[in-house]
Image (cartoon, coloured by chain):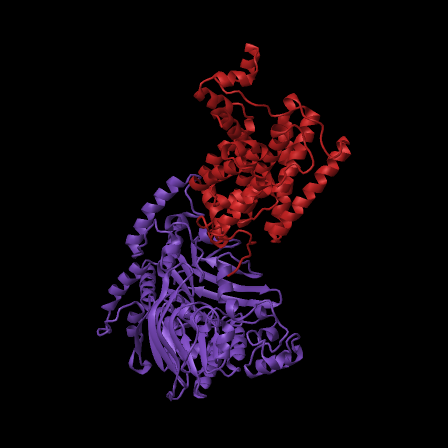
Chain colours: A purple, B red
Amino acid sequence: MTAPAIELKGISKAFGPVQANKDISISVQPGTIHGIIGENGAGKSTLMSILYGFYKADAGEIFIKGQKTPIPDSQAAISAGIGMVFQHFKLVENFTVLENIILGAEDGAMLNTSLGNARRELKHLADEYGLNVDPDAVIENLSVGHQQRVEILKALYRKAEILILDEPTGVLTPAEADQLFRILDRLREEGKTIILITHKLREIMEYTDTVSVMRRGQMTATVKTKETSPEELAELMVGRKVLLRVDKKPAEPGVTILDVQGLRVVDDAGVERVKGIDLNVRAGEIVGIAGVAGNGQSELLEVLGGYAEGTGTILVNGEPIPLSGHGADGQARRATGVSHVPEDRQREGLIMEFSAWENTVFGYHLEPEIQNGVLMDNKAIYEDAEAKMERFDVRPPDPKLAAKNFSGGNQQKIVLAREIERNPDLLLIGQPTRGVDIGAIEFIHQQIVNLRDQGKAILLVSVELDEIMSLSDRIAVMFDGHIMGERDPALTNEKELGLLMAGITDTSAVAGNGGNDTTEQEVHADG
Amino acid sequence: MDFLTLLQVLDTSVRLATPLLLACLAGLYSERSGVVDIGLEGKMLAAAFFAAAFAYYSGNAWVGLLAGIGASIILAVIHGLASVTFRGNQLISGVAINFLAAGMTVLAAQSWFRQGGRTPPLEGAARFNPIELPFAIGPTDAEAAGRPLSQLIAEAGPLQQFYSELISGHSILVYLALLTVPFTWWLLFRTRFGLRLRAVGENPAAVDTAGVSVVWLRYAAVLICGVLCGVAGAYLSSALQAGFVKDMTAGRGFIALAALIFAKWRPVYALWACLLFGLFQALELRPDIIENVSGIKVQVQLLGALPYILTVVILAGFVGKAIPPRASGEPYVKER
């Protein structure tokens, strides 16, 4: 047996009182794809950041190809042949592809020679691995999938033998994700070692050779992928049995609550983001909007929620609501029975510096039972917050703690508690489980289904196709500001939705690989 | 207005634009690296005082210049410590430096020279004197002819007038400041250092993960900023004027920041912005010219306020967007 590409021995790292990594040992064979799976906060990213020299371990040793290699900084990691593609890309947005690639790896003090050499090398890499990107394109004009390629090229340009990818598919369309995995396969064939960090069990099962599971800073198991199952992995991650499927009865839709007719939205830059869509949601059903981020879903939610302006007609309970000017604000929307769990909970759903109990009342702070026109009844709010946090199983159940000190899942529970408990007729909910761990996902999904069963209308926007498919009673797919079609989740599949998400309405030939090339072109055109 | 008057106004504009330009480029380096510096004013003021004091003691303007740069660098390092090493609030640090410089210079001047918070006037080699370029009509020609310089220039042809009045006859620091513009452009856009400097102001995480030190780059920028502010301050007290007086920067550090926004953080635009603002200041000294040309009596205070008014217009987005470097003002904290 050859020496492992990477071997970590007894790595520990603490941030203050929090033990992020506890005595972790792991060994990765060269030429394999090794998955690391675990919930948010399990310590996966910390471990990889240590390997990349971003953090310094408190204890432990790193061996690269059998050689003990201290990695005090990223420079050392790069020299040791380690490349990392972060979840949030580390690219300079207004630089060109070429400039980003040479940054930190220039050939000399003058740029011209570096750029010339990099251009040749880039062409070589593109041919070898099928990583085509225009070297002179500016990053902010590239699609997310192409930006990710630039990150991979950056690592390869630095002669990386070991490539770490942190949640690489979170922002990709299914087609883009397929392409990514083809590239990774190619890299593996060339003898590169790949570490894939993800929380998606499907990716682990489909693409990795071995998988390590992390829980609360510890490595709980390392197994061959062929010898395990999603259920087993989920249980190892959470520490108890987890329901991977949403448990729900068939919907019993009632009257139409939300009726959108010909809605158009133009953003601040003057670009039309929603291009005349029709949509309705009935009482007692969940309508899911699928689509790659940036195809108008966010703008749709913003107009419905009352903090962006649009044109067209929107009826709630049969009554038209104003889409601009007076009455087109969150306060007015809440008064008509519309609640909103915004996509970006940290910017729009919560005030991170404020405590949990204060956060439980935002938007409803004018309700007569908690204020008399001048003074707030803080005691009542606090007690109400305590009760809500208990009902929604927010941990730790301390209303005085600032919102920023809760995990993503618990922050989301605070927002949900606030919005759901006001008993809305219509709940708008964007990315309900983004950055939320498996245990909390199960709880949040159950709350949404319960609300539906109480006869409420729910409009769900999510970029997680799995989530859309398991929660929705009806799926509408958005692409480039249009609704490409509606599907019954029982009668569709991921391939078909993936094509619609890429703007292809001819989904008659969804089987096989035929659709993928077309998708590639669409993505190009979009970028 | 005749041609010669126009030249005289432009000549004054160049002289007045020079400290603005140096300070503006100083701010450009700093902000391009992600460190906002509203302490340009304070650094210039401290440099102006120390340059004048040391030039007076040594009788050598260059010694004064070095002292001015030294003083400015000390304040720049304080700003660097506060905003890079300790990740403090950059605005507060800048304000503190301005206050420190305003008080300290007057205090030191009074204690050293006892002339009411000013230095004694600088003379001869203690000042940066005008340089006479080859073939230009200058004071030596006037001496040789035994006639006043203004008469000689008035009699010359328009090209010679242009050359002698506007191009020639500035101190070395003016030419140095003008050369700093192409140099800055070259450094920012043609060298490895420039690429990294621009990157660290846009996305420090990209620089960090590429294995380059964010802290070192930002300190380098802050130090360059200190050097340029030092030159600007020394120019004020030992070239534009002859000695230090209380608060002699008179808001130039803030006008330079306005020019930086006006120039959209680009070196060549910075030159034009500073020349424009220099022209306003020159016209402030000669309100009669505007009255003669336009027939309207303009309040000089309005001219003084114009740079700020224009900057507000720019910031409001009327003349295209001015987008600052994305990471400017934000301390860099590692995150996963």
Question: Closer to the camera, A407 or A314?
Answer: A314
Looking at the image, residue A362 sits to the left or right of residue A263; the answer is: right
Which residue occupies 27% across, 65% down? A519
A78 lies above or below A324: above
Tell me how many marks there are: 0
Which residue occupies 34% across, 49% down? A136
Question: Closer to the camera, B287 or A49?
Answer: B287
Let me know if residue A267 appears in the view: yes
Residue B299 x, y percent position in the rendering = 58, 39
Residue B265 x, y percent position in the rendering = 49, 45
Looking at the image, residue A323 sits to the left or right of residue A404; the answer is: left
Let me know if residue A30 appears in the view: no
A319 lies above or below B191: below
Question: Closer to the camera, A249 or A56?
Answer: A249
B295 lies above or below A363: above
Residue A378 x, y percent position in the rendering = 65, 77
Looking at the image, residue A322 sits to the left or right of residue B311; the answer is: left
Question: Closer to the camera, B205 or A63?
Answer: B205
Residue A350 x, y percent position in the rendering = 54, 70
Looking at the image, residue A218 sits to the left or right of residue B191; the answer is: right
Image-quadrant location for residue A249: bottom left
